[in-house]
Amino acid sequence: MAAGALVGVARATKIDAMPRKTSNPKATPARRREHSVEEIAEKISVAILEHRLAPGTKLGEDRLATIFGANRPKIREVLARLAHEQVVELIPQRGAFVAKPTVEQAHDVFEARRLIEPGIVRRLIENPDAQKVQRLQLHLKQEAEARQREDTRAIVRLSGEFHVLLAELAGNTALARIMRELSTLTCLIISLYDAPTATSCRADEHEELVAAIQRADAKQAATLMLHHLDHIQQSLNLDRASEEADLESIFA
């Protein structure tokens, strides 16, 4: 074989042996989507509503930044927002912790709810709308389905969201914002002073409330709301200190 042919074979062999680039997109790991401040705050709030984050849990900036693929300034903004809503406590030189309401603060929260929520159902009835009643009935259906599959976390979250939904349907944005904060604080109080149970917010009481709203019976709806809040508060007891939470598994 001629020398030129030998060189050509050698070059071809060398080229064939070299690794080739692939155009398969799966070959490159997908970049994790960056979460917004609102999304991170919502995920933490839902974890509290579902009793997955207990009062007193430390919310380390580094751990949260890693979990959500965010930088520390964004995490600080999230924690500051939640602190403004009183669901997170910022302690100098120690960090951020899920709020741990005192017994006195628990009484204050229920007093506020007794003053606000009867007015919410009255306002809702003053502005009748069949679609609003349908949304409430759909929510009751979701609660029933959660109870049927014994999904305790969903039951607790939906119970709190029922009261927020009433405020949103009443059409007052300030009341809706206040109820979101009070509902989350109530979940913290229940988690701290009573074992999370499906009976913290009884399904039949929600059904009775919706029935009174559908009948446009404002007086009865307000009375039922007060009785409902009384039952929740009367279920509270001092509870043992919660164990340290595994943030990675909670937000996985």
Image (spheres, grey):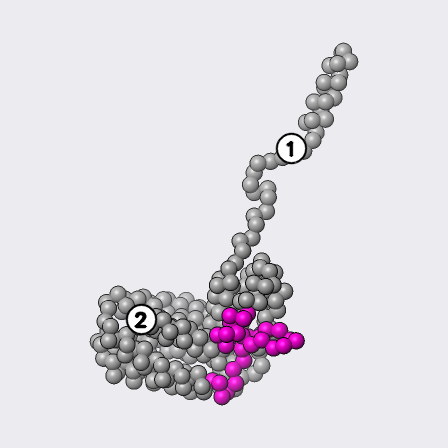
- The residue type indicated by label 2 comes to Gly
Q: Which residue is mark 2?
A: 171
Amino acid type, callout 1: Arg
Residue 175, relative to residue 13: is it above or below?
below
- Whole-percent x, y for residue 186 in the image: 45, 79
Residue drawn at point x = 45 percent, y = 86 percent: 108
x, y percent for residue 118 = 32, 81
> In the rendered image of this protein, does residue 192 appear above or below residue 47?
below
Q: Secondary structure at mark 2?
A: loop
Using the numbered discs, state the Cα–Cα distance from disc 1 to disc 2 in whole angstroms.
62 Å
Q: Which residue is mark 1?
A: 20
Q: Is residue 38 visible?
A: yes
Query: Magenta residues?
Result: 79-106
Q: How many dots with numbers?
A: 2
Q: Helix, strand, or loop for circle 1?
A: loop
> Residue 71 is drawn in which quadrant?
bottom right
Identify the residue shown where x is 51% and y is 63%: 37
Tell me which corner region of the image, top left, top right, bottom left or bottom right, holds residue 171: bottom left
Whether 97 is among the magenta residues is yes
Q: Which residue is painted at 47% across and 78% down in the image?
A: 185
Quadrant into which the N terminus falls: top right
